[in-house]
Structure formats: C-alpha cells, structure tokens
Amino acid sequence: MKVATAIVGAMLFFFVFAAPAGFAETILVEAESFETTGGWVVDQQSIDRMGSAYLLAHGLGAPVEDAATTVRFTTPGIYYVFVRTKNWVAPFGVADAPGRFGLLIDGRALRTTFGVEGADWHWQPGGTVSITKESVPLALHDLTGFEGRCDAIVLTTDAGLVPPNDNPAMARFRARLLGLPEEPADAGSYDLVIVGGGIAGTCTAVSAARLGLNVALIQNRPVLGGNNSSEVRVHLNGRINLPPWPALGDVVKELDSGKRGNAQPAAGYDDDRKLAVVRKEKNIRLFLNTHVYKAQTRDNRITAVIATDIRTGKEMRFTAPLFADCTGDGNLGYLAGADWRMGRESRDETGESLAPQKPDKMTMGASVQWYAEKTDAATSFPDCPWALQFSEETCCDATRGDWDWEAGMDRDQIAETELIRDHLLRAVYGNWAFQKNKSKDRDGYANYRLCWVAYIAGKRESRRLLGDVVLRQQDLQGRTRFPDAFVTTTWTIDLHYPAPDNTEHFPGLQFRSIAKHTPIEPYPIPYRCLYSRNVDNLFMAGRCVSVTHVALGTVRVMRTGGMMGELVGMAASLCRRHDTTPRGVYRSHLDELKQLAARGVGSANR
C-alpha cells in the first residue's frame, strides 16, 4: 500500500510516495516550488501549454545563483534522475546549447549537463544517484547565465519508469505525485472575480470594491501592472479625465506616478504604488502568483473558476455571480466558451480601409525591451554563436531596446509565447555581442554593461472577445454616436508591422517593427464592447475587448484600458444592486451607469 508523506517549509510542498521493500519510490520536485530560487526566476508565460511554470536562469550572460531546496527520502537506495528541460535554441536550428545547467544532489554535481538537447520540453535522463540520507539538499547550478530552464525533477527507484511528457497523462502524473486533492480548496464566494492584474484589472477591482462589492483579484505574476510593471516596463499612454465623463480616469491616476519612458530602471514603474492602492481596499482579496486554468459554466454563465498557486501547486475554486476577463489574452473568456477572434478581419467583412483585402492570422507582436548603462571601467560580454548573427550592415547601433524590438506578428501569440520571447532574446544577445566584440565602434561600447533584458514579453494583441458591439475604424473616424458611449480613447490608430529593412536582413526572423499611425479625435467607446455577447455574466477590460484588429490600435493603450476597468466596476455594482447581467445594465439601467460615471470612484470622491 502506498503512503503519502508531506514535507512543508517556506510554502513548499513535496509529496513522497513510499512503499514496502520491493516496491518503487518516486519523488517529483517542481522547480518553481524550490525553497529558494536564488538568481533563477519563475516563468509562467507558457503555463497553459506546459501544465506548470518553470525556473529560468536569466543572467544576461553571467551564471546566476543556485536555486536550492531540500527533499526527504523514506527509502535509501539507487535513484534514477530525470530533469524536464529543453535546449531552447534548438527550435532555431542552432547547433549549440547556451542554457546549460547542472543538478547538485547532496552537494555533488551529477555528471550529466542539462539543457543541451531537444527542441521541445522533455525528461532528460540524468543517470543515477545513491541516496543514503533521509534529508538531502538539491540545487540547480547555472553554467552560462543564458536562459537555462528547468520545469521539474523526478527521482525514482523504478528502473523502468519513463515520466509522461504530454497532457493529460503528465497532468495526472503530477497530481498523483504532488498529492493534489481531487477537489480544489474553496477560495471563497465573491460578488466579482477578476482574472488579470494589469492596469485594467486593477482598476476594475478598485472601482468595484469602492462601490461595495466583495472582489477577488487574481494575478498570475508576483506584481500588479502587467505591461506597466517592472517586469515589462512600458509607460502608461492615452489621456484620461476627458468628456463625456471626465471622472473616468481617477483610479488610473492613483496608480500612475506620471513617470515616462520605456525600458527604464525598475523604480520608474511603481510596483509598490499599485500594490498599496489595492491593499487599502478592504473589499479586495488579492491572489498573486495564482493562475486560472479552468472555468466551470452552466446555462451560458460562469459559475466558478479553478486556479493554481504557481509556487505550491495548491488548487483553489472561486465562485461569483460576475466575472471579468482582464488577462489581455482573453484567457477566461476562452475557457468559458466566449466568442472571440484573433488576427485581422478582411476589408469586405468590416468595411475598414485599414483592413487587409483578405483575412489573415497576423497580429501586432510582443516586445522584449532592454537597456545598457555606462560604467567606470570596461566590461566584457561573451560571444553568442547561438544567437542571431550580425554584421556592420545589420547591427542595430543601440544601448536601449524600446517597443520596436518586437516579433511574432506571423506567429500564434498564445501558443508560441515562449518561442517568440526566445527569438527576441537571441536578437538582443546577438546584437549586443556584436557591438561589444566585433563592431568597428566596439571601443565606444567598452564601458557599457547590459543591465536589464525583459524575460516577460510585452504583448499587444492576441484574442479579442466579442461583445454586443464590435468597434470598427469607421466608428472611430466617422464618430458613430452610441447611446452607451463612455470610455474616451485618445491614442492614434497605431498598428504595427515588421520593419522592412529588418525583414530584408533577417527574412523569416525579423525582430524589429514600425508603427503606422492614423490620427483620430478623442472618441468615447461604447459600454457594449465591455461584456461578452454569449457568456451572460462575463465582463472584459483591456486589450481583449470587443473591437476589430484595426480599432484595437487605439483602445489597447493602458490608461484607456484602466478607464474601461473603472466603468466595468461601476456596471458590476449595478448588476448586484438590480440582480441583472452586464447586458441588463445596458438595457435597463444605463442612466444609473451614467450617474456613476459622472461621479467617479476616485479616492477623493468616496
């Protein structure tokens, strides 16, 4: 009979399945649950595809500090070791392996070097190890500082075990070895559950909470702010506090320090300021590092969402009569079966002059920003033969990479997030290595040090959830008058395309973009773009709202998304007051929504 024992420490859960003599023992250690991550970072961007987050050795070419934990064994003996990893440059056809790392067990390194093979995630065999102690330390030892990655470790006395690598078998394997209960823990019942803690989601939560709703705000990163956080570092754009409802934007203003500039030091993005605003609200329960992966539905309504704590694996169930998708990717809507689009509509379908003749899957891309700083002494940077290769003609002469270090317009921004990010990392590292080591101007770069490169890609576009109104270019330019006009968008119709010269030099591997701006007059977006047309209790705010690809060019900037969140919070309060749906607010309570918008929910108006 199998016996499960749990060792708990520092929010860490290991489950060891021991058996009487003659039976195998297998231990699964999730890398993201290590007691100390050292210099490794938790990367959750591909969690839906992989089934879990992983640790990434993001050291900008300098090996990072070890990640470490302790595992308890109940049976001494010879254990077979497997590490789930990949060679992250293999998908690009490169015969090298920059993401190399080792595994130390009880202070001794295994002979196997990990991260050297396989274009896809897989269980790399690591040989055997003799375990003689009950408590044994494990450590991930980075060898390069160039994006080594580890998802999990398996140690087993079963010589015939091959850990499953594909879902659903891998999900069942994980659940069994982690001892996850069949039913998730009850995380509570709320008036409104918000998935996504960017500017739009944070404003939704604050607005609803100040109007008396009991709110859960679920964010799958350790910080709030999304693209405006210290992880991505994009400043806020768009104007706020404009007619016809000048109080909209008051909450945005509380979150916004007003500091300008992309790819700047972390302090400029005020993570603590956003967190403090949320923490002040007694009606908000904040769940950071928590990822929603399932929606339970009935009769065209979401009844609950299931989420997992990224670090511990603990599963939780959140119930509410109302939900808001502020994920950017439209993840909650997708899980709930909401209607959605991704890519560009045709000109015949939408009547938009900026739309292409034929529909396609092209989206605006994701950016990996970066910067270097001048130092008092010369610094070195290794050659990167596995990165994109540059010449005097193709090199980008730069010490900072802004929004236009953008890629993935021809890729799936959701399914291929890791690949897109990795391609941009190869571009950044390859360009910097050329500048430092081979450029005719290398003496001018001698005292520059690469200080920061984003590992969380800043997305612009993926799924758009469809509402009762799908906003189009001609609505913006022709100033269509909607009775439910509220959130004023002020940015241009800003659409991104691959930079022609970059495409010429790197065909199929472009990593730079251009922006084509079509001016508009400030225009109020209708409320009916902010709720799903077929999931009756689902709001949305941010870049996943109901617009065409062309119209997304203006509404996607974060101050505008924040005002959407303020309005959604107001509408949610009316849903509770009148026991109605988001659509019901439009049909029967629009005047009340206008009253709330006129008053606003800023801290000064409370």
Image (cartoon, helix red, strand yellow):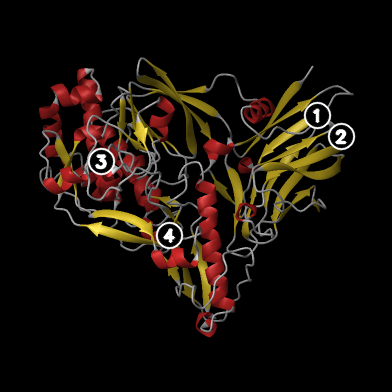
Q: Is residue 431 left or right of residue 113?
A: left
Crowding at dot 1, Cα within 10 Å, few <14 / some 14-19 / many 20+, comes out as many
Residue type for callout 2: Pro
| Depicted 230 relative to depicted 293: above or below | below
Query: In the rendered view of the protein, which quadrant contains the C terminus?
Result: top left
Quadrant of the frame with the N terminus: top right
- Residue 66 seen: yes
Q: CA distance from mark 3 to mark 2?
A: 70 Å
Q: How many marks?
A: 4
Can residue 254 be seen by looking at this rendering?
A: no
Label 3 is placed on what type of residue?
Answer: Asp
Query: Pointers 4 and 3 in contact (CB under 8 A)?
Result: no
The kind of residue tagged 4 is Ala
Query: Label 1 belongs to which residue?
Result: 25
Query: Nearer the viewer's eye, disc 1 or disc 2?
Result: 1
Rounded to the nearest whole Å, what is the CA distance between mark 1 and mark 3?
Answer: 62 Å
Mark 4 residue element: helix
Which of marks 1 and 4 precedes in the sequence? 1
Q: Amino acid at mark 1?
A: Glu
Q: In screen coordinates, is 130 left or right of 591?
A: right
User: Residue 348: which disc?
Assistant: 3
Disc 3 versus disc 2: nearer the observer: 3
Neighbours of disc 3 within 10 Å: few (<14), some (14-19), many (20+): few
Q: Which mark is residue 76?
A: 2
Secondary structure, mark 3, is helix
Mark 1 or mark 3, which has the lower sequence index?
Answer: 1
Residue 549 in percent (x, y) is at 31, 44
